[in-house]
Amino acid sequence: MIFRDTIAAIATPPGIGGIGVIRISGPAAENIARRLFRPGRPVAALQSHRLYHGEIIDPETGAAFDEVLLSLLKAPRSYTGEDTLEISCHGGPLVLQTVLEEALRAGARPAERGEFTKRAYLNGRLDLAQAEAVLDIITAQTRPGLAAAVDRLQGALSGRIEAIRNRIIDLLAGIEAAIDFSEDDATDEKSGDSASRIREIIAGIATLAATYRRGRIYREGIGVVIAGRPNVGKSSLLNHLLGEKRAIVTSVPGTTRDFIEETVDLGGIPVRLTDTAGLRPAENAIEKEGVERAWERLANADAVLLLLDGSENLTKDDREILVKTTAKPRLLVINKSDLPARLAEESLKGFLPEGTAQVVRISAKYGHGIDRLTAALRDLVLATPAEEAPGAMIAHLHQKVALEKTTEGLARAADGLSEGLPAELVALEIREALDALGEITGRTTPEEVLDRVFAKFCIGK
Ligand SMILES: Nc1nc2c(ncn2[C@@H]2O[C@H](COP(=O)(O)OP(=O)(O)OP(=O)(O)O)[C@@H](O)[C@H]2O)c(=O)[nH]1
Ligand SMILES: [Mg+2]
């Protein structure tokens, strides 16, 4: 696709920095450089993929606005696939604004959010899954999240989708061939063969779709609430996980009133961790409000760390909290393991689903058992073994929906085959499945999905 207009934006974040980058993409890029850029040493013409030192000047007066490094990346060897200019200025807001305004005066227009990446996509430099991976890299919060996004940018997901697509196309070819030779007496045998191939493809899609949970958690993180009766050590645990004395810790039950939320990287997962007021029948209006808020946070949490004091027997309040949180993904955490143990794990048996080992002993005060706690939380929310390699993961809801639609189309085709439906109708279902699959890489993505994807980007990317 060839765009006639040229877009420009400040590509670095607002504020003061060492350098700030202006990015310009489109057919006028080279002209804009010729107008605004005065090289340190005279050159006949700017060469592609070279770095030039010089000044951005006022083309009318010749006055310099800034001393810069400039590169011209000629089409198609650029991010967008178009002629692109990258100007590294000094990183001040006024400098960047001035250079951008000059670029606009020289023939560019302000870029919209994600428009550089959208052009890269429309020019075939990236497919849609890769374009979304660019955003995932920018917003990654943990190493594994970043690694998964880089994998997607490098085509891990696109490759998987392409492989599935090829298998469906082969299947379709077989079925369409049967349309032409419908008199063939081997038709029954063939349709049995097609049905089993469909089942295999569906199983492959299911494996990929199952990565959504993990992919989304690495990308968006999860909300985890630390809950328990007063004085069990919730705030101590928050502080230990944060590595700072964020919450007040005292031996007075009911110390924490309002909830405290902080984000931490727990074993590669971005976790929004909330410390809450100790749960018990409140003694006054302030505490009552705190306890209500704590229950509210609990209701909305993805998972709960339910803290118990291992140096005491289970209390009535403990039991009540245990009962009220059974429906939540939770870990039972027995704290104060440095003190003589009074709480028997047997007393918790009734609160744990059969065969699960969701009890961890820790000392929040001395940091014992925290690694085990982190690993157990990871296993709980990911529902997969911790050592599983990332591989190709889907991370966006529309990707999951597209896989589901693909499966539905294939399942209808399989039903059609077993019911002896005409091959034409079966082929139609398979074509629909292909279309649904194509939405992930952008082959068949509706305009509004594209708009939604690129609207999430920042300006300048
Ligand atoms: N020995 C020991 N004491 C602990 C441990 N964790 C917390 N404590 C102590 O237990 C008391 C209560 O700790 P907090 O972290 O304030 O407990 P909390 O659950 O936040 O209490 P509330 O905010 O009142 O609900 C403090 O005196 C802590 O020093 C631990 O692992 N071992
Ligand atoms: Mg507290």
Image (spheres, helix red, strand yellow):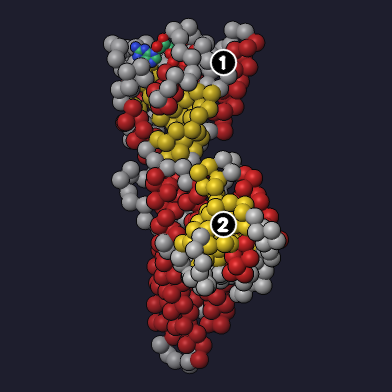
Relative to 443, say whether 54 is above or below: above
Q: Nearer the viewer, residue 44 or 367?
A: 44
Secondary structure beneath dot 1 equals: loop
Q: Identity of the amino acid at label 2?
A: Glu
Q: Nearer the viewer, residue 289 or 19?
A: 19
Evaluate whether residue 26 shows in this view: no
Q: For the residue carrying disc 2, how many other residues have a C-alpha within 10 Å: few (<14), some (14-19), or many (20+)?
A: many
Residue 420: image x %, image y %?
Answer: 51, 79
Q: Nearer the viewer, residue 75 or 374?
A: 75
Q: Identity of the amino acid at label 1?
A: Arg
Q: Is residue 22 left or right of residue 332?
A: right
The residue sitting at 42% across, 49% down in the picture is 146
What mark, if any, has residue 55 been given in the picture?
2
The residue sitting at 59% across, 41% down in the picture is 15
Whether label 1 lies within 8 Å of ligand 1 gets the answer no
Relative to 179, say whether 391 is above or below: above
Residue 370: image x %, image y %?
Answer: 33, 27
Quarter occupied by the N terminus: bottom right
The residue sitting at 50% across, 49% down in the picture is 138
Q: Nearer the viewer, residue 238 or 376?
A: 238
Give the CA separation, mark 1 to mark 2. Answer: 58 Å
Residue identified by numbered label 1: 257
Quarter occupied by the C terminus: bottom right
